Image (tube, helix red, strand yellow):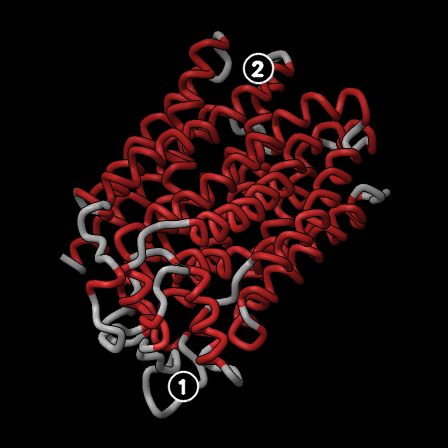
Amino acid sequence: MSPGITRPSALGAADLSLGEFIDSRPVGRFHYVVLALSGSVMFLDGFDTQAISFAAPVIAREWGIPVASLGPILSAAIVGLMVGYLVLSPLANRVGHRRLVVCCTALFGVLSLLTAAASEPAHLIGLRCLTGAGLGAVIPSLVSLTSEYAPKRRRSSFVMFIYCWLALGFVAAGLVSGLVIPVLGWRMMFVIGGVVPLLLLVFLVKSLPESPRFLLSRPRGIERTRSLLHLLDPMSGSQVQGLILTPPEEGPKKRPSRVADLFSRGWLGSTVLLWVAFAANLAAFYAIQSWLPTIVGSFGQPQAIVIAATVLTTIGGIVAATVIGPCMDRISPFRTLGFVYLMGALFVAVLGLVIAGGPTLLLIVAFLSGACVTGGQMSVTALASLLYPPAMRSTGVGWALGVGRLGGIAGPLLVGTALGQGVAAREVFFAIALVLVLAGTTVFRIGRIHR
């Protein structure tokens, strides 16, 4: 047994609250099911989001539209993501995280299939925006469910784990596109992106648990929560029956909204700075992911190198997550992430210098850039889940992701505009590097506030 884990029998039946009970459990089968299902949805989210980046150059040739006009198509899903985060995800407070995940997974699966039938840019933009709304709505609920069932000592690791699957979805989109698009065309990418989520629904309906906090606010909530906790730890026995279960509001009066909590005296500065960090990171992330295939290809690099460079930016983030996560836990989440962003600025600037050079150096720098930019995107979400207390966590993470999408929308659009006006690719990457410097200094500032 790992240090810090209390055996169920060592605590009195009536001595634990819900949170203390979850924190005292060893990681077991129930946690693995939650991680597997949450990770699967995140994987499909990443696949669908990135598929358009590899399909876009082919669509431009097929429909005879200039490359500079791809910006709205590439940003449409990001607009939808923001709508999902800010408008749809709060519905989880009324319908539950589980139901929202199931419904929105079905939604983006169907809309992805409809995307495969798009016949003009306007149709494609509209469908990508609606698909993004479904994709965005599920992420805060998945983060909340994963965080809620994670023991406190593993919370950041659990969140980083499911975000790794989002990144793996990006990698899979690159690999699959190289096999599918040359043979079956770009539309097949969205057929795959639609069919697989619909198949996953069977497992989500059967095995994805509901949030205990949500259950406690519903009729027969205490009984349903105890049944769920028996599944979390079948050996807990009478201890579950003796748990002190209270409503999630932890008070006699239910507040109508927790969004205002993010702007209270103790949180206003941290919330605004966190949003800046999210927006800066997402601007750099989506600018690179959306335009790197087109920019690398414009320098005459073969398609294999185009795909490899883009995929390596994501693989770099996945590899980095195995290092960043433990450093955030053991050193400081603020100092660790701030340093990652500053290193990312350096590598992205170098990427602009080597993008027209030999493929070996290009791939190495793409990997290092992704380690910091994609790894930073995973880490800043974990930082948000650590920054806010449990009562504010879901709202804090969801709104940071949603407002941060403004940067994700602006990034690809601004890069497309710059390239359309003849700005050199090197200068575009230098600008992205400055955005990452902003993200790093912002995170350091949040750390000083909470020191």
Q: Residue at x 39, y 82 (%)?
A: 247
Name the mark on residue 255.
1
Q: Residue at x 35, y 37 (%)?
A: 434
Q: Secondary structure at mark 2?
A: helix
Quarter of the figure that contains the C terminus = bottom left
Please determine whether, in this image, residue 295 is positioned above or below residue 227: above
Dot 1 or dot 2, earlier in sequence: 1
Residue 181 image offset from top left, x and y in percent: 75, 25
Q: Nearer the viewer, residue 38 or 299?
A: 38
**Residue found at the far bottom of this picture:** 252
Instruction: State which mark lies toward you, 1 or 2.
Output: 1
Please determine whether, in this image, residue 29 is positioned above or below residue 140: above
Q: Nearer the viewer, residue 410 or 385?
A: 385
Tell me the CA gap for discs 1 and 2. Answer: 54 Å
**Residue found at the far left of this picture:** 451
Q: Amino acid at mark 2?
A: Ile
The residue singled out by tag 2 in the image is 305
Q: Nearer the viewer, residue 108 or 217?
A: 217
Name the mark on residue 18.
none
Q: Residue at x 32, y 27 (%)?
A: 346
Residue 228 image offset from top left, x and y in percent: 47, 67
Q: Residue at x 22, y 45 (%)?
A: 2
> How many marks overall?
2
Q: Badge 2, how many Cα within 10 Å: few under 14, some, many 20+?
A: some
Q: Badge 1, how many Cα within 10 Å: few under 14, some, many 20+?
A: few
Q: Nearer the viewer, residue 410 or 143?
A: 143
Q: Relative to 72, is 368 on the left or the right?
A: left
Q: Quadrant of residue 272?
A: bottom left
Please determine whether, in this image, residue 84 is positioned above or below residue 215: above
Residue 197 image offset from top left, x and y in percent: 68, 47
Q: Amino acid at mark 1?
A: Arg
